[in-house]
Amino acid sequence: MEGLDNIDNIKAYSFKLLKTDEDTKARLGIIKTSHGTIDTPVFMPVGTRGTVKTMSTLELEELEIQTILCNTYHLYIRPGPELIKELGGLHRFISWKRPILTDSGGYQAFSLGDLKEIREEGIHFQSHLDGASFFLAPEKAIEIQEVFGSDIMMCLDICTPHPSTREETQRSMDITHKWEKRCKNAKMSTGQALFGITQGGMYGDLRRESTQSIVDIGFDGYAIGGLSVGEGKELMCEMIEVSEPYLPVESPRYLMGVGTPEDIIEAVSRGIDMFDCVLPTRNARNGTLFTRGGKLVIKNARFAKDRMPIDERCGCYTCGNYSRAYLRYLYMAGEILALRLNTIHNLFYYMELMKGIRGAVREERFAEFKGDFYRERMTEGAGLR
Amino acid sequence: MEGLDNIDNIKAYSFKLLKTDEDTKARLGIIKTSHGTIDTPVFMPVGTRGTVKTMSTLELEELEIQTILCNTYHLYIRPGPELIKELGGLHRFISWKRPILTDSGGYQAFSLGDLKEIREEGIHFQSHLDGASFFLAPEKAIEIQEVFGSDIMMCLDICTPHPSTREETQRSMDITHKWEKRCKNAKMSTGQALFGITQGGMYGDLRRESTQSIVDIGFDGYAIGGLSVGEGKELMCEMIEVSEPYLPVESPRYLMGVGTPEDIIEAVSRGIDMFDCVLPTRNARNGTLFTRGGKLVIKNARFAKDRMPIDERCGCYTCGNYSRAYLRYLYMAGEILALRLNTIHNLFYYMELMKGIRGAVREERFAEFKGDFYRERMTEGAGLR
C-alpha cells in the first residue's frame, strides 16, 4: 500500500505536496498522522455513527481505505463523548487503527436536530432521536473531537443553505469566522490537526473574503464548505476556482460532502485533495452500483438472468464471486448480504478511482486520465442502460 | 482444517464411521461428497434463501463451516429452479464451493404457504410472497433438488404437528413412507445423496415402525423428523432413543431443526451425527449471544459501558476486536454491522462446540466433555445474568 510504511515513526500531523499537474491544478500529496498516512487526493468513506454502514473495519482495511470520516453530531447524541472516552477513544471504540477525520457536528445539528437555534454563542438543538437538549459551541465541538481523539478535527461553521440572500450569507459567514477563531483558541491537543472551513455561499467576493479570513487565522488544512448543496456542478466548480488561489499551496484542501466520481475528478482538476460523501455507501444500499460505464441499478429486471459480475473488469470481492442475477435476487429478497456486497463494490470503485487519479498525477498524465474517464462512460455506459 | 485435504479425489458420496464413544452413543465420522468432506458430528448453519443471513461465503469458509443447509421451499418460489439451473446450479449461484444439504420444501410449504392442502399425490400451496400456486410432489421435490445440485437431498415427508392424535400421526406417517419410496424411485442423479426421514410423532411404537420402514426402503442417510416441535427436551430425547437402535450403524443420522447447544450435546450422546438450526443466526439478529456461560443479551443496559468482549476466551473476529459496549451501541442504533458481528460470534461458538465434541469423541473423553459443558454454564453463567 502506498505510503503506509513508516507508521511507527510518525508522531504528529504533517502534509507534504509531492507533485502538481502541469496541465490542471491536480495535486499529489501525503498527509501523516499518528495513526498512519493518507495519500491524497483521498476519498473518505463516511462512518456516520462510528461504522461505515454494513462494513467491518477489517473489510475497510482490505479495501485499502486509509481514513474514514465520523460524524460528531451522531456520536455526540449517542453514545456520547463520555462513553467513548471511557472506552479509550474513538479509534478503540470502533476498532479502527487508521486515521479518522471528524466533522464538527454543526451541519447535522442544523439539518437533523429539532428546534435548532443558531446564536452567536453556538447552536442549541434537540436530538432527532429523543428530543434531548444539546448545545454545540465552537469550544464544545473541539472538546468533543479531542475526547474522540480524531486525527483531523473540523471547526464549527455555519453551512449557508442554497439559495441564500447576500445578507444571510454574509451574516452566517461572519459568525463562522468568529467561531473558527474560537475553535483554534479552544484547541488543547497537540497531536490532532484542526482544519478551517471557508464559506461565502455562491457569492464570489464573499468566498474570497472568507478564504482569506480563514487562512489568516491559520489552520492545518482548509475545507471549502457550503458546496454541493444543490447549486449544480458549474456553480460548484466556479466557487472552487474562486477560492483556490487564496488557499496555501502547502496545506491540504478538502471539499466537504463531495461527491460523484465526476465531481471528484472536476474538483481534483481544480486543486482539491480531500473528499467525503455518503454516495458510494448509500447508493449501494439503494441498489445503485458504480461502474466504469456509469451507474447500474441492480433491481432492473434485465439483470434477472445475467450471469456477468457487476463490472467484468472490477477486482472486488463481489465481482470476483457473484453474478448480477444473484445480486439482484438478494436485493429483491431484502437480504443483508445484498447491501454488503453492493457496498464492497462501490467502495472498491471509489478507491480504484482515487488510485487511478493519484497514479495519473504521479505519472503526469492526469488530463489524459480525465479524458479516458469520460470516454469510458460514453462507450461502456451503453451496455448498462 | 479436519478432513478437507483430499477434495479433488472425492467423486461421490460416502460415510465412514471412525469411532463410537464407549460411555455414550456419541459417534465420530466423516461424510465425503463431490464438494468436499464433512466431519461429524456436524452443525449446518441455515442458508434459508441461498445465503446464511448477513454472511458472505468467504466468512463461512473462514469460520471453517463445512456445509450449509438451503431451503428448497424458499428457492423454489424465488428465484425458482429454472433460474438456478441457468446460472449453473446452486453452488455456483450462491458462490459456495463446499457441500450443500437441501431439505425437500415440504416443511415450509406447510408452515409458511397459504391455502395449503396435503393429498396423497403431494402438497398444493400458494407462495407466502405473492399467492402464486405451487405443487410439491415427491418426484418434484427430487427434481428440484437435482437441479440445484445439492450434495445431500432430503425426501419429501409430512412433519406431524405436536400434539397430534395417534390416528393423525399414523395417517401422515403412512403417506410419508409412500412419498419417500417415490422419492427414491424418482432419483436420477448418481452423484447426489438422498436421505430418508423417519416420523411417528411422539408415539414410540410408531417411531419404531417408521424407522424400520424407512430403513427398509434404503437411503444414504437417515433423518429423524418431526422433533423439536414443542414436545420438550425429555420427550425429544426419548423419541431419539426409541429410534436409534433401528438406524443402521454405517449411515449418518440427522436430527432436523435442532437445536440449542444442550440439545446437540444430548442428541450426540444418543448417537446423532448431523444438526441444522436457525438458532445461532436468528438469535444473533435478536441480540442474543452464546457463551460458555450461557446466553448473553447484548441490549441489556448493564453492557453499556462494558469494555470486555462477548466472551474473553472466544477466538472469533468479533471478540478479538469489539467490546460489549460497542456491540450494544451498534445494536441499539440499528446498525447492520451489529447483526453481522453477532452472527460471526454465534456461528463461531457453534463451530467450536462441534469441534469440541468431535475432539472429545476422538480422544475418548466425551462424557467428561459433557460434564464440563454443564459445569461451565453454572460457574460462568453467573457473571452474565
Image (cartoon, coloured by chain):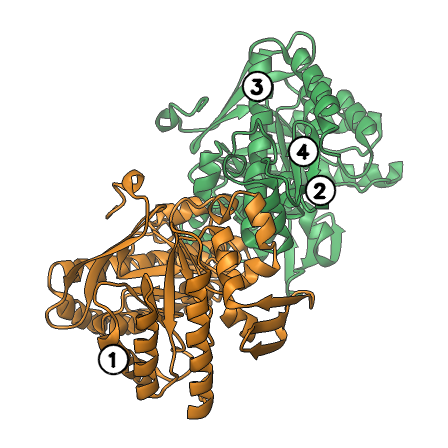
Chain colours: A green, B orange
Task: Please give left or right for residue A148 compared with residue A368 in the image.
Answer: left
- Residues packed near mark 3 inside 10 Å, few (<14), some (14 to 19) or many (20 plus): many
Q: Give whichever of discs 4 and 2 has the lower sequence position.
A: 4
Q: Position of residue A317 (x, y in %)?
A: 49, 37
Q: Residue furthest front?
A: B185
Look at 61% across and 57% down and name the residue there: B78
Kind of residue sitting beneath label 3:
Arg
Quickly name the residue at label 4: A197
Quickly name the residue at label 1: B241
Q: Is residue B70 visible?
A: yes
- Residues packed near mark 2 inside 10 Å, few (<14), some (14 to 19) or many (20 plus): some
Q: Nearer the viewer, mark 4 or mark 2?
A: 2
Q: CA distance from mark 2 to mark 1?
A: 53 Å
Q: Are marks 2 and 1 on the same chain?
A: no
Quickly name the residue at label 2: A302
Q: Nearer the viewer, mark 3 or mark 2?
A: 2
Q: Is residue B160 visible?
A: no
Chain letter for mark 2, please: A
Q: Are marks 3 and 4 in contact (CB under 8 Å)?
A: no
Q: Position of residue A68 (x, y in %)?
A: 54, 38
Task: Please give left or right for residue A37 compared with residue B115 in the image.
Answer: left
Q: Nearer the viewer, mark 3 or mark 4?
A: 3
Is residue A170 depicted above or below B328 in this figure? above
Is residue B28 depicted above or below A298 in this figure? below
Quickly name the residue at label 3: A358
Q: Are marks 3 and 2 in contact (CB under 8 Å)?
A: no
